[in-house]
Every structure is written in C-alpha cells, then in structure tokens.
Image: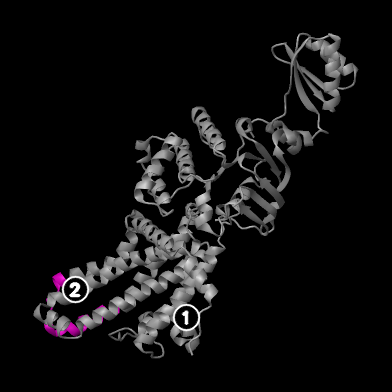
Amino acid sequence: MMQQADPGLRKDLMQQPWALWWLQAKRLTQIELRRNLFSWRASWIYFLAFIPTLIISIHSIVDPHDPTSISDDTQVFASIVQLYYIRLGVFFGCLGIFSRLIRGEMIERSLHFYLLSPVRREVLLLSKFAAGSATALLLFVTATLANFALIYLPFGAAGRDYLFNGPGIEQLEAYVLIIVLACLGYGAVFLLLSMMFKNPTPGALLFLGWEAINPVLPSMLQKLSVASYLRHLMPVNVGVKGFIALLTVETEPVAGGVATLGLLLLITAVLLYSCYRIRTLEIRYTTE
Amino acid sequence: MNDLIVFENVSKFYGEVLGVNRVSLTIPPGITTLVGPNGSGKTTLMNLLTGLVQPSSGSISVMGLSSRDANKFFATVGYCTQFDFFPRDITGWQFLVDSLMLYGMSKLTAIQLAEESLQRVQLDKTAAWRKIDGYSKGMRQKIRLAQAIAHRPRVLVLDEPLNGLDPMARAEAMALFEALGRQGIHLIISSHVLDEVDRIADRVVLITGGYLIAEGNIHQVRQEVREKPMQVLVRCDRPEALASKMFAMNHCVEARLHPDGKGIFLRTGDVDQFYSILNEIATEGIVKIEAVAPADDDANAIYQYLIGSEGGTL
C-alpha cells in the first residue's frame, strides 16, 4: 500500500515561494553564465575543450582518409574521449569552472553580495551549479560534436555511411551522455571541494589519484568515483597498455542504465551535502 | 512584525578569538551609531545582524525576521559592507540592476529603482555605465551605497560609509543618511568619524574588545558616566572670575579659557552641584552669564571617557 505523504509537510512545501525561487535561479544562472563564458580568464578552459578539435582539424586536412581506416579513427576518437576528455580536459576544465563559483568569489571578496541578496542559499548554490554545468556542457559537448564531425566527415561517403547506417550516431549519443555526466559529476565534486578547502587544487589532485586507483579498490569504494560509472557507458573499448592504461578505467561490469542512475545519485548526494555546507558558510575574508 | 532589532545574549567566537561576547541589545528605529576602536567588534556585530556570520550562542531578530529566511529578510535589510571589492568586469549599472533583479521584480522596475538610487547617492549615470574596476574609491563607495539602498530597505546597515569620500561627498552622504533617518527606517552606522555621525545619530552603541559597554541616547549614556568629570562651556563677561569662584568652592577640577576670551570651559565631577552653584553666582551678579552648555556631551567625549582613546577622528 502506498504511504500517504505527511499533509503538514505537503502544505509546507506548497506554501514555499517556488515561482520566486525559479525566477531567481534563472536570473542568477544568466548572470553567472555571462561571467563564465565572456571572460578572458575562461580562455584556458576554451583551450582545454578545443585543443583536440584543432589537432583533429589538422589531421583531417593532411591525412588522406582511406575508408579502410575508419575503425582506426574510431579507436582514436574513443581514446580522445576516455584518455583526454574524461581524465584531463573535462576534469581540469570543471575544476576551473566550478571551483571559481564559490571559492573564487571568496578569494575576490565578492561572495557577500550574493549572500546578502534575497536568495535562499540553496537556490544560490544550485543556480551556480546550473551555470557552471551549462558552461562546461556548452564547451565540452560542442567540442565533442565538432571532433566527431571532423573525424568522420572527411571520409566522405564511407564516413556518412558509418554515421547514418552504421553505429556512428549511437556512439555519438553515448559520447555526449558521457561528457554530460562527466561535467555534472566532476562539477558537483569540485563545487563541494571548493567549499571545503581554501585551495581546492590539492584536493582535486587527490581526487584524480583516487579516480586512477579506483579500479583496484573494493566494489563499494568504486561507487565513489565518477570515471568508473562513465566507463560502463563507453561505446568503444580502448585497448591500451602500460602507464597510459592508468588513464583508462576498468571496473566491475554494470549495465549502462544502472551506471547513469548511480552517477546521478552520487551527484545528488554531493549537491545535498553542498547545500548543507552553504547554509553554514560564513564570510570571513580575512582568513582567506 | 515588530519594528525592533534584538540581540539576545549574542556571542561570536572565531575559533578561540573573541568577536563579541554576550551582547544584549534592542535597537528601535532611527539612526544608531556603533562606536569602538579597530577590532572592537563593530563589523562582527553588523555581520551577525545581516547573517554573514552566525552567532556561536544567542539569537538575533531583525523586525521579527531571521536571516535564514533570505527572501523576506533581505527585502527588509540593506547592508553596505566595508569590503571594497566587486564582482569582476562589471559596470556600476549592471551591478545595480543585477542585484535588483534578484528580488523578483521586472526589469523596468529594476531600472527605475537603479536610477533612483544613483540619484540619491549623486553618482552620474554615465559614470555608472563604466566598469567598476576603473572607479575612484569615492565612486566605489557610492555605488556600494546605491546598491544597499536601491531596494528601499527598512533596515540599512552601513559599515564605515564615509571612508574614501571627499568633504563634499561626505556632506552629501550625511544629508542622505539624515533624510533616510527621517523616513523612520533603522539606520545603523559604524564610523570612525565621530564628529560627523554624532550630529545625526539618535542613539549610540559603544563597544570595545567585543563587549558592549554602553548604549542608548547620547545624553543618557553621558549621564551614565557621571563619575567622570564633565566639561561645561559657560559664556560670560568675566570668565577668570567665574573660574576662581568655582575653584574656591571646590566644584571645579579644570578650567580652560575659550579662544575668543568670552567664555570658559569648566570641568566638574558633580554636574548637579555645579549647576546649582552656577545659579547662585548668577544670582549674586558677580558674573554676567550669557549661556551654559555641556561641551562634551557627545559621542566623541563619551567614547574618550569609556574607552580611553583620544577623540576626534579615530
């Protein structure tokens, strides 16, 4: 039998100013997006996102693109996503974007303007997270789409056939989902780290180490990793050996849907804890 | 909703460092001056009031509201901090409109209120269109003040609002504070420039070392420190004769001639007895007294007595 929701709680929830919170969240997100995307300080994140695009562009010009090498390029693209974007590009890009949202404002001593605004702190945090996510997604999803197009379209008819009659589009969807989840997952973690530590970079490097050793940890601990969930969504396996294999992820096999749900639950848990942290956040710039 | 700001036994510790200790304070509407030396706890008190820091113990209520209810609380409260920092790469106008838009108002209303607040702080609209990074200190102070008052708060908290302003701008700011005070809002000002805020303040709160040492109407507070000698200016035709008479009757501990020679500053330990004897002298006709006024019945003097620092600009 379904349990009835507590009528007092329901009434309480109904009485909250949801429309105002939604409006404030939209406006805060707009403000943050403007600051994230149109700033010279964000140029290095553009660089992180689009450096593979530049390299692939050069490759597409100078390489003869023999139709038989499509499978090789498919492997190359899978490696770029798994070895570069997930491990380095999105990781450090999100570190830059999300740690600036709260910690950056504390360092620049401008966070108090937000905390003195008529915005519930949870709304503020989630809006900043939304803006950071939108920034990261815009850059890294655009780069992924551009990379994908630049990999396959120079093959001409064979490339188009791979995309529309072969596994191409399905792979693209999987890569986009991976990038989206990576941005949200790393974003949530770095937002929290930036509230916990004055300098989130050492914490982020520890997290990078944690992600690297995660495959050898017990299965319970593997669930506390972003990359381990993403691995199950990879449409193409990357066969690498030696030191570089540390950048790939090998974990217990899990269905794609379960991995997506697991990562979304992890993101939700991290965001809930971040909401708790921002409730108790105090402005003490002198100790920054 | 009541109209009081209430601190109930509020303490704030930063680790082992004391911010404020057991402050109990009730502030009615009007202009209240927070006075104390650097590090005395003035800013902590203001940050506590606005929820930027949380009390270690005790509770704070602003017109019955808590800072945890941000929507209602910050619609009522405006705080101009002394942090001279702004969001990066932003114009003064954008700063004002962005802040106002978070109240849920339409863009048109936000623009109207932004224009109104710029007028009130007398900051040119063309200057507001420039990036804040290029502002002078006085302009930055004005734009912060404009942002704090733009949504027409009923409680306005100003931390060192006269810092960085030139004499003309100071006079304009003081006129603005006076006008806001007349509207019946709560205006809480901390300032080192006691002479200026003293002129418009209804109440004074004296704080040192994190402890509240006196609060209330300036004249009441002065009365509370009666054991300290009080200085009275007596305008009369024969100041030297008056001084010698007072010294002879053992009710004067110090005398100083007024620079124009037509009056004398007398310091007494028992002001009631002093006035009584002064009346007798006037009745006897030895000295023709034109005017009598307390010479140090202001926040500056009270501050000097209670905290032991020199007055003037601290």
Residue A38 lies, with reference to residue B151, above or below; the image says below
Residue under the point 50% across and 73% down:
A10
Task: Identify residue type, mark 2.
Answer: Ala
In the rendering, at what x and y percent does residue B245 appear? 87, 14
Magenta: main secondary structure = helix
Q: Secondary structure at mark 2?
A: helix
Residue that label 2 marks: A149
In the rendering, at what x and y percent does residue A217 appear? 48, 86
Residue that label 1 marks: A224
Q: Is A74 in the magenta?
A: yes
Instruction: Check the residue under mark 2 and report the chain it is in.
Output: A
Q: Is residue A262 left or right of residue B41?
A: left
In the rendering, at what x and y percent does residue B286 appear? 84, 8
Nearest to N terminus: mark 2 or mark 1: 2
Task: Identify residue type, mark 1.
Answer: Leu
The part of the chain drawn in magenta is A59-79
In the rendering, at what x and y percent does residue A48 appear? 32, 66
In this orientation, which residue lies closer to the viewer: B160 or A78?
A: B160
